[in-house]
Image: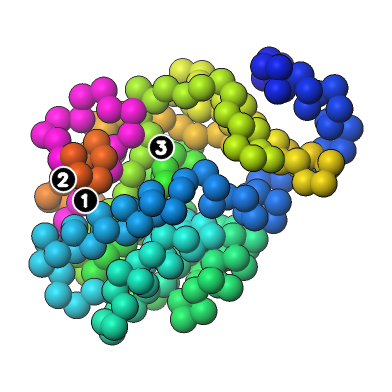
Amino acid sequence: MFLRSPVDCLIRGYFLKNMELKIYQSQFAAVYNQIYGDKFYRDYANFIGRAIKNNQIKRVSLLDIACGTGKLLGELNKLFKGRNILIEGVDASMAMINIAAKENKKVKFYNQKLTDLEIGRKFSVITCTFDSLNYIIRAGDLEEVFKRIASHLSPGGIFIFDFNTIYKKICPTIVKDNVVYCNQIKGKFWLIDILINKKGKIYKEKHRERLYLFKEIKILLGKNNFKKIELYSFFDKKINKSGKCPRLFIVAKN
């Protein structure tokens, strides 16, 4: 069993009688933003802004895929305030979109899986953040996602994303307010059991991420005509080689 810490034992002994199992539904969507603090979202938005400037994207239209609760979109709207910029979002979870739409009333959202991405127009910037690509478990599906992203990117556009690598390290148990994250890495997979305590009732979600090597991602970028690839170990730390970074941030230009 994955429950091993004192916190886990407490949950097992008292709360588990009222569990519900769903993935990225309303209970987790409501607490999702606590995973990263406000500063992280601002720093990520500024990172995207710098990438747009450095790559001389003059007419910005931005599509954020796997946009979640839209927290990053909110920071991007602040960053681009006063500029006539089209920003749209896509997510597979309607619960996430419902929250995102309340906070970003001028943004159009699409409820789609990444493997089914079809907006019907191109964008000069596409983002996929917060290790969303790691939720694509099958290599064939990830190849399809990259193909669809490339088809939605304007000539000279940029694709900005991050992913967890096989060098990922994580604490077995993390507690944040009323949420417990129980983590286990098995080979190239990160298994996450999320327990949410809401008024004495526990809701459970089971997540699984596939951890990728940079060379796997690089091959897919090459197949889809991304000719320029910039690597970052963090927002302000550009690197020449991926090394053993646990997480990589990438700016790819077609």
C-alpha span from label 3 to label 2? 22 Å
**Looking at the rendered structure, which numbered label has been put on residue 230?**
2
- Is the residue marked by circle 1 packed among few (<14), some (14-19), or many (20+) residues within 10 Å? many
Residue 140 in sight in this render: no
* Front residue of 42 and 70: 42
Which is closer to the viewer, label 3 or label 2?
2
Which segment is the magenta one? Answer: 238-254
Using the image, tell me which numbered label, if any, was put on residue 109.
Answer: none
Q: Looking at the picture, which amino acid does disc 1 mark?
A: Val
Q: Which of the two discs, 3 and 1, labels the residue nearer the N terminus?
A: 3
Q: Which residue is mark 3?
A: 139
Residue 216 x %, y % = 29, 33
Asked which quadrant contains residue 88, the reply is: bottom left
Please provide percent x and percent y for residue 189: 49, 26
Task: Check whether the beta carbons of the residues at disc 1 and disc 2 lie within 8 A of each other.
Answer: yes
Q: Is 165 within the magenta? A: no
